[in-house]
Amino acid sequence: MEQGTQKYRMVCTLTFGDIYGQIIVWLIVIFITLASALALWSTTRQIYALATVGIVLLLSLPFLVFAFVTTLLNHIEFMPLEEGASTRQFTPGGTVKGTQKPAQAAG
């Protein structure tokens, strides 16, 4: 290995449980917005009801994206590889190359 170069392995430890609370809070915001839109709905104030839904969605989406991205970035780890350690290559399906065994016939 060249002098001064270090290999790293990137590992993402994000699980659905990490963002589950954020999804629940955002769904609550959506349902409260829809309830307020129904409360404002009448023949003379339909535009206010639609504007309420639009404004709340427009204002809440950046916060939702920010929460998702920061949660994702907090769960990405870069671990240095030791000298001479083998680097396992991952396939897009999430399995490690070379660790799969061939299928065998039963019976």
Image (cartoon, rainbow, N blue to C red):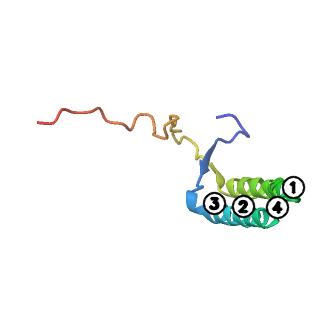
Dot 2 lies on which element?
helix
Q: Residue at x 88, y 59 (%)?
A: 44
Tell whether label 2 touches label 4 (CB within 8 Å): no
Tell me the distance, in whole angstroms, between the alpha carbons under discs 2 and 3: 17 Å
Dot 1 lies on which element?
helix
Q: Tell me: 27 left or right of 65.
A: left
x and y percentages locating residue 84 in the rendered image? 54, 40
Dot 3 lies on which element?
helix
Tell whether label 3 touches label 2 (CB within 8 Å): no
Residue 30 numbered tag: 2
x and y percentages locating residue 46 in the rendered image? 84, 56
Mark 4, mark 1: which one is toward the viewer? 4
x and y percentages locating residue 14 in the rendered image? 60, 55
Tell whether label 4 touches label 3 (CB within 8 Å): no
Residue that numbered label 3 is attached to? 19
Tell whether label 1 touches label 2 (CB within 8 Å): no
Mark 3, mark 4: which one is toward the viewer? 4
Amino acid type indicated by mark 3: Ile
Q: Name the N-terminal-most of marks 3 and 1.
A: 3
Tell me the distance, in whole angstroms, between the alpha carbons under discs 3 and 4: 37 Å
Residue that numbered label 4 is attached to? 42
Q: Tell me: 51 left or right of 4.
A: right
Tell me the distance, in whole angstroms, between the alpha carbons under discs 4 and 1: 13 Å
Amino acid type indicated by mark 2: Ile
Residue projecting furthest to the front = 43
Q: Residues within 10 Å of mark 4 (few under 14, many from 20)?
A: few
Q: Residue at x 80, y 61 (%)?
A: 41
Which residue is more in the foreground, 23 or 10? 23
Q: Name the N-terminal-most of marks 2 and 3.
A: 3
Which residue is more in the foreground, 98 or 49? 49
Q: Name the N-terminal-most of marks 4 and 2.
A: 2
Amino acid type indicated by mark 1: Ala
